[in-house]
Image (cartoon, grey):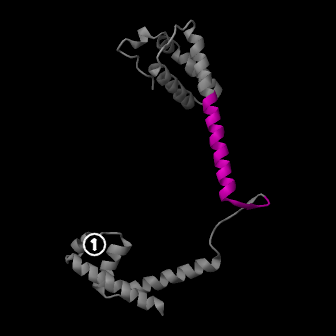
Amino acid sequence: MEPAEPSNGRAEDNPLLRAFFERREALLLFLASRTRSMAAAEDLVQDLYVKLATAELKSEVRSPAALLYKMAANLLTDQARSVQRSARRDGEWRRETVVSIGGDDVVREPAADEVLLSRERMRLLAEAVQALPPQQQRAFRLHKLEGRSQAETADAMGVSRKMIEQHIQAAVRNLAERLRT
């Protein structure tokens, strides 16, 4: 997307902006040839435009075209450094968080016995919830499993909030008792 030339006369007042609009396509091709990506080049041209549009000229620019290409090259350098920093940061994070032995990553998954125990606990909890009286079961499911507030649960069940509190307290007591054994 090409930036529209400002209508407030800034391009006429600013030789860099004027040169930018005259050489935009050439700058785009210059950057695309170095990034090997038209999308990346477009982003860099946009960044260049923003820099030019927001910069205040403190002195006369003798060669606006040369300065534009220098600024574009600097943006390329900045982008390359940013990519390198990001890659370095990602590599450091990976080294700190992933365990590897002999160059092979060790997967951080729970041990098989832990998985089996967890599944068994979930099965027991599901059975215990199924065994609750219907009103307690519904209140527990809506509030604790679906994450509804007590007010929303009371509205859904057509009872008072106090009744929901009582159903949930009774359900938690029943579940704790059943799962203890």
Q: Report helix, strand or loop for mark 1.
A: helix
- Which residue shows up at 42% across the image and 9% down it? 13
Q: Which image quarter holds the N terminus?
A: top left
Q: Is residue 106 magenta?
A: no
Residue 133 vs 88, above or below: the answer is below
- Which residue shows up at 54% across the image and 31% down it? 39
State which region is magenta.
77-102
Answer yes or no: is residue 36 visible.
no
- Which residue shows up at 64% across the image and 28% down it? 77
- Nearer to us in this view, 156 or 66: 66
Q: Is residue 126 left or right of residue 108?
A: left
**Which residue occupies the extreme bottom position in the image?**
181
Q: Residue 176 sits in which quadrant? A: bottom left
Residue corresponding to mark 1: 150
- Nearer to us in this view, 64 or 43: 64
Answer yes or no: is residue 149 visible.
yes
Q: Position of residue 136 (x, y in %)?
A: 30, 84
Q: Amino acid at mark 1?
A: Gln
Q: Is residue 97 magenta?
A: yes
Q: Is residue 147 left or right of residue 151?
A: right
Q: Position of residue 137 (x, y in %)?
A: 33, 82
- Nearer to us in this view, 150 or 112: 150
Q: Residue 109 sits in which quadrant? A: bottom right
